[in-house]
Image: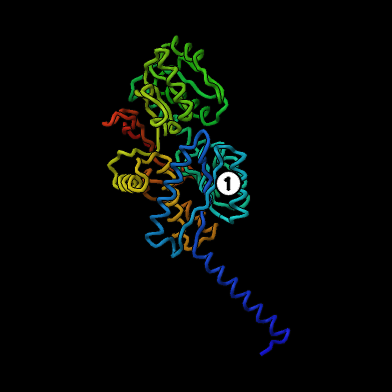
Amino acid sequence: MKMTGKLACAAASVLIALSAAGCSKKESNTINLGGIFPLSGNVAVYGVECKKGVDLAIEEINAAGGVNGKQLALVSEDDEGNPDKTVNAFKKLTTKDGVKIIIGSLTSGCTQSITTLSQAGKIIQIAPAATASAITDAGNYIFRACFIDPFQGTVGGKFAAETLGSKKAAIFYDVGNDYSVGLEENFKTSFEANGGQIVALESYSTGDKDFNAQLTKIKNAAPDVVYLPDYYGTVALIAKQLRAQGINTPIVGADGWDGLTTNAGEEVLNGFYSNHYAADSTDPAVQTFVNSFKTKYSEEPNSFAALGYDCVYMLRDAIVKAGSTDNEAVRSALEATNGDYVTGHLTFDAKHNPVKSAVMLEIVKGSDGKLTTAYKTTVNP
């Protein structure tokens, strides 16, 4: 039968509507999470390991039936640890890919480059490891899974004074790195409050390779501990020159050291750093995660993997509690988080910073002769 023009138009409209409904139904069965990680560049260890933790959590959750009957999917971008590229990745994920939740980025500078954009667009942004205090100042759509620099700087100072029994400390930090500066300030305050004295305060600039002039001054000050608050690549360079100068005191750092055991040699022994979890913990949740990660990747997970993993499970719990993927409902549910995760029992304070413990790890030689970490102590908030 030949259709009239009106009938043909009506039929076409029905087909288009059915097609659109089919596409909508297909899309509604998936919850897309955006991910921004430094998968290449100077801090690639952070991003690669974090993404592995995210991927593992998504795989587990989907295998268990998903979230409210929907499957999770990760759409990720590499920002190379460059804030400008973080912004580009954010714009691509939120416009082209249409994501409403972003995990990332990893370093504080990259993460902070998009917090205002996230808040303005009502995009839930959860930072796995960005520890600078100002990260969550942008507003109530910004969260993080890690403790903040003032806390771990305080932890480092208290540990050096109380556990190591140090009386005289030298601090060597990157004057152009907010992460390093924030840790330096809080370590100094904490160490002095615990009866210690800062006998040398030296700095360098990002990208420097020769530290011998400053290390000579540190040696002459005769400290019994040296605080090195920076990322693993720089710490590896400094530690080698520090030991070559004959400075054999303990060295203490923060979570940016994660990755150091595979990027440095014996010069980092007698080194200790604050971190988000200990892989050798006897906690059942930790051991389940570690074993699953080893099965999938044939390696032990660092703290960035654990934090990425926890981000996904916190989001899973919030979406379940909200009963929908409406961002305001999910945001509200995420605020009310109160549960046990791999990196500890977690709640959020008024600024969406986690309230949880920190651990101190020691760099040691494993039974295979390779560098690894061992749990030293826990410091509560």
Q: Splitting the image into 4 quarters, where does residue 19 fall? A: bottom right
Q: Residue at x 37, y 36 (%)?
A: 380
Question: Residue 227: image x %, image y %?
Answer: 44, 23
Q: Residue furthest right?
A: 5
Q: Is residue 114 left or right of residue 267?
A: right
Q: Which SS class for mark 1? A: loop
Identify the residue at horizontal 68%, vertical 81% (top origin): 10
* Residue identifier under label 1: 139
Task: Name the foreground residue: 41 vs 281.
Answer: 41
Compared across the picture, whether 377 is left or right of 62 comes to left
Instruction: Check disc 1 and give the amino acid type.
Output: Gly
Residue located 73% across and 84% down the image:
5
Which quadrant is the C terminus positioned in?
top left
* Quadrant of the rendering where the N terminus is positioned: bottom right
Residue 57 coordinates in the image, percent (x, y): 41, 51
Vertical order, 54 against 227 (above or below): below
Q: Kindly give the residue lying farthest to the bottom in the view shown.
A: 1
Q: Nearer the viewer, residue 318 or 107?
A: 107
Q: Is residue 86 above or below residue 367?
A: below
Q: Nearer the viewer, residue 223 or 207?
A: 207
The chosen color scheme is rainbow
Residue 143 percent coordinates (x, y)? 51, 46
Q: Farthest front residue?
A: 1
Residue lying at 40% horizontally and 35% vertically, measured from the top left = 275
Horizontally, residue 112 falls left or right of residue 338, namely right
Residue neighbourhood size for the residue with mark 1, other residues' Cα within 10 Å, grouped as few (<14), some (14–19), many (≥20): some
Does residue 149 appear anywhere in the picture? yes
Location of residue 319 in the rendering, given as x and y in whole percent from the top left corner: 47, 58
Q: Quick check: 328 left or right of 305? A: right
Do we see residue 192 in this rendering? no
